[in-house]
Image: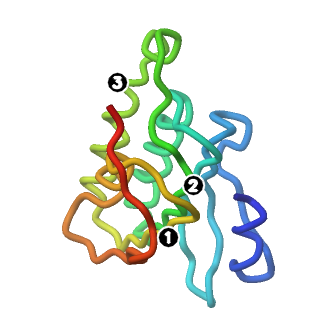
Amino acid sequence: MREAIARFVDDSDFLDFKADYGAATVCGHAAVQGHKVGIVTNNGPLDPAGANKATHFIQACCQAGLPILYLQNTTGYIVGKASEEAGMIKHGSKMIQAVSNANVAERSRWKRSGPSAQYTRFESGDQCRYRPASREMRRIG
């Protein structure tokens, strides 16, 4: 996803947020057509560390009044005993709450299809979002 980000942000300039923590989740600051934005994306399923990282970043963007761009490339939350013991439910629900309570402009863009729970997570609230009609939605479980 870093390559995708570099293609559309101004001067391919992207400032990573906690780059070494929850490495599958990419959060950071950039400018798009001269407007400063926060970017949240994933390379695969969300793990507890990535959900925690995204929560902190979303809250920081809200405090700074920075619009958020979600680039969705995830198949949902990681499942299994190890992730549950690491707090996936706890950190995942914190992320859902952070997105739901975000009080800044938000936009979403899909790189590929994913489960509908993913769209619920990134698409909650009253903000206007972009949703391409060609993407597939499905439910897990």
Q: Amino acid at mark 2?
A: Asn
Q: CA distance from mark 1 to mark 2?
A: 9 Å
From the viewer's perspective, tell me whether residue 125 is left or right of residue 90.
Answer: left
Of 46 and 31, nearer the camera is 46
Residue count near mark 3 (Cα–Cα under 10 Å), binned few <14, some 14–19, many ≥20: few
Q: Position of residue 32 (x, y in %)?
A: 62, 82
Q: Amino acid at mark 1?
A: Arg
Residue count near mark 2 (Cα–Cα under 10 Å), binned few <14, some 14–19, many ≥20: many
Q: CA distance from mark 1 to mark 3?
A: 26 Å
Q: Position of residue 66 (x, y in %)?
A: 46, 70
Which residue is identified by label 1?
Answer: 109
Q: Secondary structure at mark 3?
A: helix
Q: Position of residue 74 (x, y in %)?
A: 54, 48
Q: CB under 8 Å between callouts 1 and 3?
A: no
Of the numbered discs in the image, which one, if any, rests on residue 117? none
Q: Position of residue 13 (x, y in %)?
A: 77, 72
Q: CA distance from mark 2 to mark 3?
A: 22 Å
Marks 2, 3: nearer the viewer: 2
Q: Earlier in the sequence, mark 1 or mark 3?
A: 3
Of the numbered discs in the image, which one, if any, rests on residue 90? 3
